Image (cartoon, helix red, strand yellow):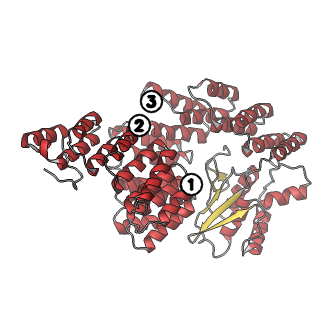
Amino acid sequence: MANDDESGVGGDPRRAHARAITTGDAATNRGALNNLITLYSKSGRRCEALRVFQSIPSPNVVSWTCLISTFHDSTLSFRHFLSMLRHILPNNRTLAALFKTCASLSALSFGLQVHSLARKLGLSSDPFTASALVSFYCKVGFVDHARKVFDEMLDRDEVCFSSMVVGLAQNSRPIEALSYFAEMRRAGVASTMYSVSGALRAASEMAMFEQCRILHGHTVMTGLDLNVVVGSALIDGYGRCGLVREARAMFDELEMVLNVVGWSTMMSGYAQQGDFKNVIELLGSMQERGMKPDHYSFLAVLTAFYHAGLAEEAERWFGRMKEEYGLEPWLEHYTCLIGAMGKAGELESAETLALTMPFKPDAAVWRALLSTSAYHGKTDFAWKMRDKLLEINPNDDSAYVLLANAFASAGRWDEVKEEWKTMKDKRVRKEGGRSWIEVCGEVHVFLAEDRTHERRDEIYGKLAELMEGIERLGYVPVWNEMLHEVDEKQKREALWYHSEKLALAFGLLSGSTPPGKPLRIVKNLRICRDCHEAFKYISRVVDREIIVRDVNRYHTFLNGSCTCGDNW
């Protein structure tokens, strides 16, 4: 029927088992029994797989590996491995299966011991073992360990590179992920759907839209563009970069082969823009094609209403999710609803929901309420939310900064000073604001009042020209988020040189971006009210579309208005 080297056969495992008994293979052919273990495992029949294994008179390393792989998401995998060591040493595939189990269970301690064994057996540099080891270390957050394993590999194939690229992307190290993908291409190693998907995720995290387009071209050249996994990654990548039209074009091309994940990905792209109309339209179309919305579909729906500030609609769809679709909301769904209620000024009701929902509120819940209460000028409520946030993480700088914003807006400068003093006393450092813009495939990063760029004189000159232009149109600085009580001249200069304004000025310099092309800026924090107001006026002065992705959402400025409706 088969020999030990075969990985398995297709079909119904019970039928294959019956055939093996009829032909006598079940009694004499160890390879056939190994294949049966794999078949039963793939069909989820673990008890039958174990019984087949127990029927083998002298299990070899392949037999043990098949059994260990059967229980890849259970501690039974470890127990079977320890039993194996009493009879026979593992090979590279056995260790790879174990590392998969360690990654699935986040079993760091056991994984470290298996790594030590792999080194003793001389298998830690084997590509098959090392790829699984890289995935394991990335899964548990030990990225530097993964890089060391990768660097020690003797031969690096597409699986090795894919593990490294995906692992770095999943650990929010996008620049390194793209660097390894580039190294893979230079080495002449073929791209896979996994390496391309990982690279797209990395590019989209940095909103590097030019890189997404380059990767799209690469998928076309390699024939991966019509792969469902890669197609979904392209939709997600374009959506995360704010290129919703491009995402929709990709979606329309693959619509007939996409599953619910692909549809939900497209919905998520619209949701980040607060475009609830397109989200709801897609939800209806998905159901017309016989697909049932899942938790991610409804997360996109609620995210869209949250960004649009429509609390009533968010509540209605939250109820439909449970009552009509039988889906129990996750914490993320509650967070969207609570955030929407907070934006609508329903702070007390939102707090009540946070305290009565079937999950313990996390930092995202209290931060959403702190942010919205600060926006509405409810300083006492904001103070209470700040304390809730600090109970979870005493070093959360956003707790102090958001409350200080609320006090500054109310002109309560003594309280602002007290917040800064408390931060200093507790040695909590405020995360520095930075913005970046991609020009010709290169990312330029700016800090507030940054003078390190080689074109700094041109940048500051362009910025002065812009500010002069918008003041003629009626722009008035928004002072109420200034965190220090200073004179008007100092306030004006402090506001002028925010990182997103410097990035915008650079993008508008001659030779930086083609005339008429949208300017795309990413900021690691929330865009302040003054920059938001200034960008609306600047979009009129330069007659350009300006797209900003801050920590909360996308803002598209055009003809003096923003798609967020000044609600973020």
Q: Quadrant of residue 446?
A: bottom right
Q: Earlier in the sequence, mark 3 or mark 1?
A: 1
Within 10 Å of the Cα at label 2, are there few (<14), some (14-19), or many (20+) other Cα atoms? Answer: some
- For disc 3, the marked residue is 327
**Residue topped by disc 2:** 293
> Considering only order in the chain, which callout, 2 or 1, is on the residue closer to the N terminus?
1
Q: Position of residue 396 (x, y in %)?
A: 72, 43
Q: Which residue is mark 1?
A: 172
| Amino acid at dot 1 | Ser
Type of amino acid under label 2: Pro
How far apart, in angstroms, are the residues tagged by discs 3 and 1? 30 Å
Q: The residue tagged with tag 2: helix, strand or loop?
A: loop
Q: Nearer the viewer, residue 279 or 411?
A: 411
Instruction: Judge from the rendering whether residue 456 lies leftward or rightward of residue 519; answer left or right.
Output: right
Residue at 74% across / 49% down in the picture? 529
Q: Earlier in the sequence, mark 2 or mark 3?
A: 2
**Nearest the eye: 125 or 278:** 125
| Vertical order, 567 against 507 (above or below) | above
- Residue 28: x %, y % from top left: 13, 45
